[in-house]
Image (spheres, grey):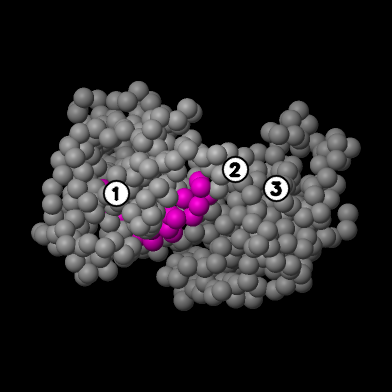
Amino acid sequence: MASVAVAVASVSLHGCYRSSGQTTAERALGISYSAINKHYNNHAPIRCYRSSHNTKAIVAVETNSSTIDAANLIATSSSERYQNYDRLLPCPSHKSTPRVEHLVVSEGGTVLEFICKSLHLPPLYVADLIQFGAVHYALVCPPPPPNATEEQIRIFKEVTEPSVLRKRASIKGKTVQRAQKTFRITSVDQFVEPGMYIRVHVHPKRFPRCYEIDWRSRIIAVTELYVVLDKPAGTSVGGTTDNIEERCATFATRALGLTTPLMTTHQIDNCTEGCVVLARTKEYCSVFHGKIRDKMVKKLYLALAVSPLPIGIITHYMRPTNMAPRLVSEDFIKGWQICQLEVMECNQVPWPTTVIQDKYCIEDCEWPSKDYAYECKIKLLTGRTHQIRAQFAACKAPLIGDSTYMAAAIAEMANPGLNPFGKYNKDFSCESEKETAVINWIAQHGNVPSVAIGLQACQISWDDDEHFYKAGLPWWRSQMA
């Protein structure tokens, strides 16, 4: 097959990663410069089919609702050179423009040399990406999104032609759908064969706060079966699609000097701090999952809201989509998931000072009144993603620093009825009118919080409080201590 460069988007490079010390980065990632350079230089170039786009557009194979934003597609040339890449460590303090590359292999070889030659990236940088978990593959190219280019569609048809697939021994006995499932590349030496799909997150999401934390001081308890961590805000519990290196489980493992990596048993948002249980064995990880499933694990939260809420149970219904923002309705909607929480206490406290907000990177969301805040103790009766954040915002009491939901709450206050699922929701003349209103309401939500919001998982217990743990003071109380 001839080499083809698909004329779609690559985002222009804004900035680069520079390593001030080779030994530091090499030691942290466990990668040898000399071995990789020798490996890379001993292999010939490999051809590929290429497609890339901004990560604001989600890959179609990952979710049924995925699309590619045609406005973000920019023609590129296969002869482009990206000379500014060095290493992923040390972690840059700035954010890089998202860049995800989608490749289809046309000649076999190792994944390291394939990506290096296809994207013109240095071998050490590619090795770092693989170590971070930022490179994924599928045996067969997944279907392109509905708005794919003619070239993308042509290439997909060419490499998934039944006569072509029948010749591939690696997929014998598998359905095409199964062969299109994506997995992480775990080794620079992993072999890639013609027809395989490779996705490279060239600019993985970074978590610089991981390197600022005294992780040993955040350990609440260590047992033979699990570790309880007081998770700092601005960090990921179990990692992201493109970064499983900079996560709580990894740094807690290193802080304790453990030889077996800790495992994630449950999640809390990156911008939330507080109690997280990490399993020391696969068996206990499964056991704890069972306790969560059987509702044997109790969690209490502290939330710092901009307005007071009444004591008692608050009920909403959440739209069943796996995308942020999470939309909630005060009224029952068929198919939507019930969300319930109990506000146990609500106390007026000082609004965080500017010094404290700056220290914890709390975003100023331009809430009109900043005299007092309200600290609420919450018991979750259901455990939906973003539940507290979405429900509090729906009650006109968004959490301090929550740039995603506070922006929408402010917009709704200025224009009552803007929320099609709120108190002033109206009847729509047709389905398209309602869809437009929903799209407009989603657009009112802001960006993802950069570090912290006013939310802490303050307490966790299970087995009728036989195991009972509390987090330290939330960030906003540091000004009161």
Magenta span includes 439 = yes
Q: Which residue sits at x=52%, y=72%?
A: 17
Nearer mark to the viewer, of 3 and 1: 1
Q: Residue 23: horizontal and vertical position, in percent?
A: 47, 70
Q: Is residue 356 left or right of residue 48?
A: left
Q: Residues within 10 Å of mark 3 (few under 14, many from 20)?
A: some
Foreground residue among 276 and 374: 374
Q: CA distance from mark 3 to mark 2?
A: 22 Å
- Label 2: element kind: helix
Residue on which disc 3 sits: 145
Q: Earlier in the sequence, mark 3 or mark 1?
A: 3
Q: CA distance from mark 3 to mark 1?
A: 38 Å
Q: Residues within 10 Å of mark 2 (few under 14, many from 20)?
A: few
In the rendered structure, which segment of residues is drawn in magenta?
437-456
Residue on which disc 1 sits: 396
Q: Residue 449: horizontal and vertical position, in percent?
A: 38, 58
Q: Residue 19: horizontal and vertical position, in percent?
A: 49, 73
- Label 3: element kind: loop
Asked if residue 459 is positioned above or below residue 235 in the image, the reply reads above
Q: Is residue 40 left or right of residue 457?
A: right
Nearer mark to the viewer, of 3 and 2: 2
Q: Residues within 10 Å of mark 1 (few under 14, many from 20)?
A: many
